[in-house]
Image (spheres, rainbow, N blue to C red):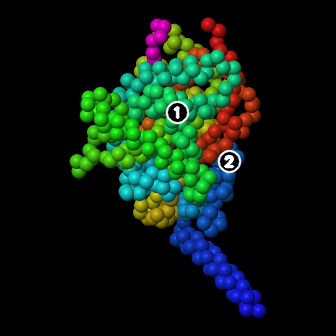
Amino acid sequence: MEDNNLYLSLLLLFVSIVTLSLFVLFYKHRSAFAAPNLPPGATGYPVIGESLEFLSTGWKGHPEKFIFDRMIRYSSQLFKTSILGEPAVIFCGATCNKFLFSNENKLVAAWWPNSVNKVFPTTLLSNSKQESKKMRKLLPQFLKPEALQRYVGIMDTIARNHFASLWDNKTELTVYPLAKRYTFLLACRLFMSIEDVNHVAKFENPFHLLASGIISVPIDLPGTPFNKAIKAANAIRKELLKIIRQRKVDLAEGKASPTQDILSHMLLTCDEKGQFMNELDIADKILGLLIGGHDTASAAITFIVKYLAELPHIYDRVYQEQMEIAKLKSPGELLNWDDVNRMQYSWNVACEVMRIAPPLQGGFREAINDFIFDGFSIPKGWKLYWSANSTHKSPEYFPEPEKFDPTRFEGQGPAPYTFVPFGGGPRMCPGKEYARLEILVFMHNLVKRFKWQKLIPDEKIIVDPLPIPAKNLPIRLHPHKP
């Protein structure tokens, strides 16, 4: 009898604790949205909010559906929701983009999910916002057009070697893994002067685990993508620390140049207090650069290959433009800055690909003050999300948005704040010009060698968080006759 009473008491205690916890969660969820005059919208379930709907539309290949369904439902260019455990407002359209991009560090500031801070431990000593500001001070002299001019020949050499070893003499292959290898090789060479393919290969597997797990559900249990990302980051960091220490020695002995790459620059640059970055800090900065300089470009390149396979008339014009450039070159002569600037139509094609399948789906900000926008109150601390698809796929800004039409980018091109694959304002991607070069050099080397066809005509697209073909885009190659 006493055992039964004890069991019943424990059961009642358990039920009471669960009920109280659910009540607290529900109360916190409700109270977070109790501010007056908020934008219209729904908040979903406690804790998870509308995160599943937000993510699942991407998994099904239509991330814009979450946005457009709610724009129609609430007749508004902004609406409230709850995603990634945070109260949020989704900003839609060019006016919203302009507002967010123009008020950086005035009303809004960059925000990253906590998972990013956990993967990059040096950010915990400051925070990801401060680290991002540091990087933006360091990068301009390496990623501005004048500095990038000297990289074109190096990029072309890497592209030629890439195609010679991994594409030539192949009948069928899968594009996305090869696009990732190409962009990763470039990043390793240009950021750290690593040219040995075998050395780069040491990074590749852990790097892909990191890239796929960094913006995942932050559950640090064995086997979860997040846990794999943390382990992968630690493995890459160890390898980077070896490279950093060797570079210090090489710089001291005059075997390396102070201006040869971003790594040398980081080692030799001090802040306003005269302090140099420590080795772990530099390792995390390089790690972040490798992710930024690799993931989005490889997705863009994969979709360029997809659309050139599907649209022969577009391929023909790209081929014609690239062959006109090739004919001006003597045998073995590398591409240069002027050649890349002649690739106008090819870049318009790349831009139209990034409009239809933006590698960067959007970005988060955080309200650093209370403010009013479009008549609605936005409380301090709320997360704000801008969506590339809200303009890229809207007929208001791009007539017949589902149609592939590179001429949209001729002349003045799209209206300001409507085409935003690289973000905008002070936080516009600093690697925009670098991405243009690596994409165009790839296109030149690809179309010069091959036509191709998709092996899965109706291959599904998933967005998680980057858009990728579900089977990584297998194709059959048709080499041009000499």
- Residue at point 30%, 32% (across, down): 250
In this rendering, position of residue 478 left or right of residue 86 = right
- Please tell me the numbered disc located at residue 201: 1
Res 296 → quadrant: top right
Bounds of the magenta span? Answer: 330-335
Residue that mark 2 sits on: 59
Seen in the picture, residue 129 relative to 295 is either above or below; the reply is: below
Q: Position of residue 189 (x, y in %)?
A: 43, 29
- Please tell me the numbered disc located at residue 226: none
**Residue type at tag 1:** Ala
In this rendering, position of residue 121 left or right of residue 324 = left
| SS at mark 2 in the image | helix
Q: Position of residue 383 (x, y in %)?
A: 51, 59
- Residue at point 61%, 76% (across, down): 21
> For residue 287: magenta?
no
Instruction: Decide if residue 290 is in sight here.
Output: yes
| SS at mark 1 in the image | helix
- Residue at point 62%, 33% (across, down): 176
Q: Residues within 10 Å of mark 2 (few under 14, many from 20)?
A: some
